[in-house]
Image (tube, rainbow, N blue to C red):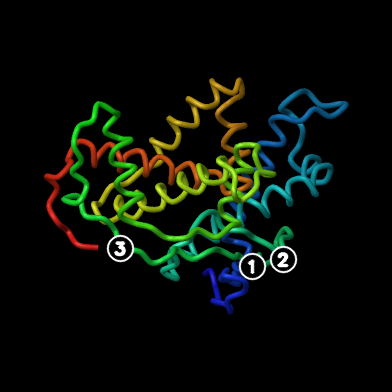
Amino acid sequence: MIEWTLLDEEGGYRRLQIEAPWEEIAAEYRDLVTRYAASVRLPGFRPGKTPRGVVEQKFHREIIEDLSLRAAQRLGAEVASQAGVEALGPLEASEIECEKGQSFRARVRYLPLPEFRVPEPADLATPDDGTDPRDRISRRLLELAPFELPADLVRQELENDGLGESASDSDAWRAAAERVRLMVILKRIGRREGIEVDGKDVNARIAEKAVEFGTTREALREELAKGGGLQRLKDMLLAESTLEYLVENQGSTSNKGV
């Protein structure tokens, strides 16, 4: 059973203290050992035939580091859901305690979702000016739901694009802030309208991006899992699906409330 405590706020962030017994993460540990055993090459053993015990001993540090990141992200997301937390951006784990056979502990901090009025579909009717209807609705959403974003979140978005050094008064900063704000608005609307993104959607996009980046699906998924990228990808897919939904149902969707 996962235990958690909601801690005091600090600098706009909120924190969760998480503790889970080894049984909660043992399957992930076994999966990682299997992956290492299948991929590493050690003298005296054929590829994929290295005994698990040898792999665990030789790559103990690397396996535990991978396990720490994976467990922190998964358990953090589960606890956030249990606590009714609406996080703005990825969960950040720190003070991780992880060792084989022992309880897992970590602190997860997050930026809470700001309060704002979620636009109703009836508010989104816009005249056809010849531009892409997705662009028109996006602009309208940004007009109807103004709210400030924490600078840390905008900076994270810029770092994802390799523009982490952009100044707060730059065009790159303003564009990143609008992208994040639009994603937050669409995520809230998607939740209200019952729009969901499942594992098949995520897997399909990972496969598509793996081809684009010249890597394997497994390698890309592992990379995404380490830094909260899987949740960010899921949020992006939800935003895309919600925007398409609004385009198709512009001005005709029933009012379901917030």
**Marks 1 and 2, the one that precedes in the sequence:** 2
Q: Where is residue 69 in the image (x, y as percent from the top left)?
A: 65, 52
* Amino acid found under the numbered disc labelled 3: Arg
Task: Specify the label residue 107 is tagged with.
Answer: 1
Which of the marked residues, 2 or 3, is nearer the chain's N terminus? Answer: 2
Which residue is found at the position 77% from the left and 32% from the top?
50
**Observer-nearest of 214 and 65:** 214
What is the C-alpha distance between the residues marked 3 and 1?
31 Å
Q: Disc 2 marks which amino acid?
A: Glu
Label 2 and label 3: CA atoms lie apart by 36 Å
Secondary structure, mark 1, is strand
Q: How far apart are marks 1 and 2 (CA)?
A: 6 Å
Q: Which mark is residue 95?
A: 2
Please report the residue visible at 57 percent of the width from the left and 60 percent of the height from the top. 24
What residue is shown with label 3?
Answer: 117
Query: Looking at the image, do the residues carrying marks 1 and 2 touch, with CB atoms under 8 Å apart?
Result: yes
